[in-house]
Amino acid sequence: MVGAQARASSSLRRTLARAFSSSSISPFFHGIHVFQCPDSVGIVARLSECIASRGGNIHCVDVFVPEDKQIFYSRSEFAFDSTRWPRDVLESDFQKIGKHFNAERSIVRVPDLDPRYKIAVLASKQDHCLVDLLYRWQEGRLPVDINCIISNHPRTSNTHVIRFLERHGIPYHYLPTALGNKREQEMLELVEDTDFLVLARYMQILSGGFLQAYGKDIINIHHGLLPSFKGGNPSRQAFEAGVKLIGATSHFVTEELDAGPIIEQMVERVSHKDNLTSFVMKSENLEKQCLSQAIKSYCELRVLPYENRKTVVF
Amino acid sequence: MVGAQARVSSSLRRAAARAFSSSTSPFFRGIHVFQCPDVVGIVAKLSECIASKGGNIHCVDVFVPENKRIFYSRSEFSFDPSHWPRHVLESDFQKLAKHFGAERSIVRVPDLDLRYKIAVLASKQDHCLVDLLHRWQDQRLPVDINCIISNHPRAPNTHVIRFLERHGIPFHCLPTGPGKKREEEILELVEDTDFLVLARYMQILSGGFLQAYGKDIINIHHGLLPSFKGGNPSRQAFEAGVKLIGATSHFVTEELDAGPIIEQMVERVSHKDNLTSFVMKSENLEKQCLSQAIKSYCELRVIPYESRKTVVF
């Protein structure tokens, strides 16, 4: 089975698996609620009362109100009995609270019941981030459905990536780009049914038009510690600058190149013992970790845009 | 006692203390740094030299880059000066240096040789200066401080001024202005130093000064170079929404904030940080990063490498 069929039955299978798990026929599901509204007294009380009144048990709460702005951000995790608090009632209960507090953002998600996030991954010639993502996905550590891979670089049928994708029924679209032909129209069609995009070392710059037309989040990995070494070949730039630390940055894509809100950054030490090859190797290592960490945080609803260039990451 | 007298007697006292220490060990610790064109047999020759004089090698770092035939090494060894007197040590290594056409051959015996003499330049920000002075007082900074030079005044009842007076270290206030860097006066004041430390000194030293002084100058930049060069990197970082901030210590060259990097350190920041905590974390890093750089430098661990880099053993 491929595509939509696979996804629908996968969702059903997961629900059934949960409902009939051998250890304990537990009707308890794990819910996440993210909230952003103008700050006032009583929000936490109201949210927690709502959850408690439905028999929900809160496991984890992160609340953040910046010093200088009256904006309230929270993320709560709770366990609830879906027989007592059905999914659709959960949704409407939080919607009511959202309305009451005039919330800019109120998202509730039940990972084991809701459809997985659908993504498309864009890549160019460099394999390492793509392969790492696919491997984590196969291991069940990346809770998404991969609609397709899009690349401006061809891959022959006997490559590891292509064989992997064929085994899993994930389409691979080769869209070579050229000056004046970014293939963005075709891409937009291919990614229409996705929840967000991942640029896994995709080396083309997406136009403002594309970003606006797609309208949803796009996560990119930059192989450098932004804002250092923007643009091309940051490993070589770092190597020649004689830095003692190199890094990777995952961030949201905006019109300005390598300047969108940063989600995660990681570093590693380098020294005179490193040559350009080991710089690149350490960098690739960091990129894989940093990108997958960003996607994980994003899927767990931990990442909230904050002011115009930053993120809250709970 | 102040100044030169204090230094000489301090050196004497240290040597005496070593010689008459409770374990009555005649062994002194030596450090040798070597840089020459690479050939077969350098390590053999260096180690044979040390062994032949009864020296015991504790630590060796050798580095030859992949793409250049240049040999760098740093050795630490203990030796008995009655078997291997200091001046013989010096000439033995000089012979080797000549033999290998060495660009750099430096031997140092911390407990016998004179301490490095430094001057520290600071501006309004105190934290790096104060941290340096405290470490120096705790004997964790093996230097003699000739003087402090600042373009920002400090009143006599301030912690820094009282500290300096207690220890007999002169404080020179040289206010700067447009077209008035006071560099001539600074050069005179630092003539007798081995290297300079810029502890958040906010004036840019001219190429003329650097050439006239001729010796190494270590600076602390409150950002992770090459990010956020120039002014107020904490604010720049805060507004850029980065998740990591850092500090960089480096040698000063004509180009601002671009000299060979010696050490870099980072710390995580998040949405929970405001500009104040950014600055606090940054100041913390600057203190650690600067003192680590000075320590490495004094231990002869830092060797310039190619045009913009360093080997740090």
Image (cartoon, coloured by chain):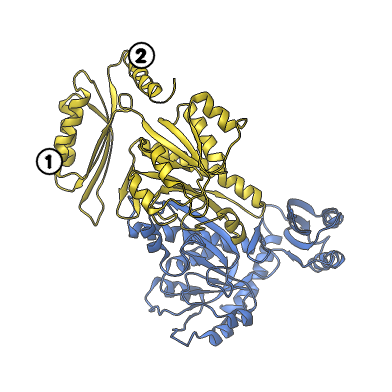
Chain colours: A blue, B yellow
- For disc 1, the marked residue is B99
Q: Secondary structure at mark 1?
A: helix
Side of A228 where A110 appears, left or right: right
Q: Is residue A205 above or below residue A62?
A: below
Quarter the N terminus of chain A occupies: bottom right
- The kind of residue on which mark 2 rests is Ser
Q: Which of disc 2 and disc 1 is earlier in sequence?
A: 2
Question: Is residue A310 found left or right of A225 in the rendered image?
Answer: right
Q: Is B180 in front, or is A290?
A: B180
User: Dot 2 falls on which chain?
Assistant: B
Residue A201: where, in percent of width, then height?
47, 70
Return the x and y of residue A30 as percentages of the image width and height. Answer: 72, 58
The residue singled out by tag 2 in the image is B21
Q: Residue at x 29, y 28 (%)?
A: B109
Camera sees residue B288: no
Q: Look at the numbered disc 2 and give the secondary structure of its residue.
A: loop
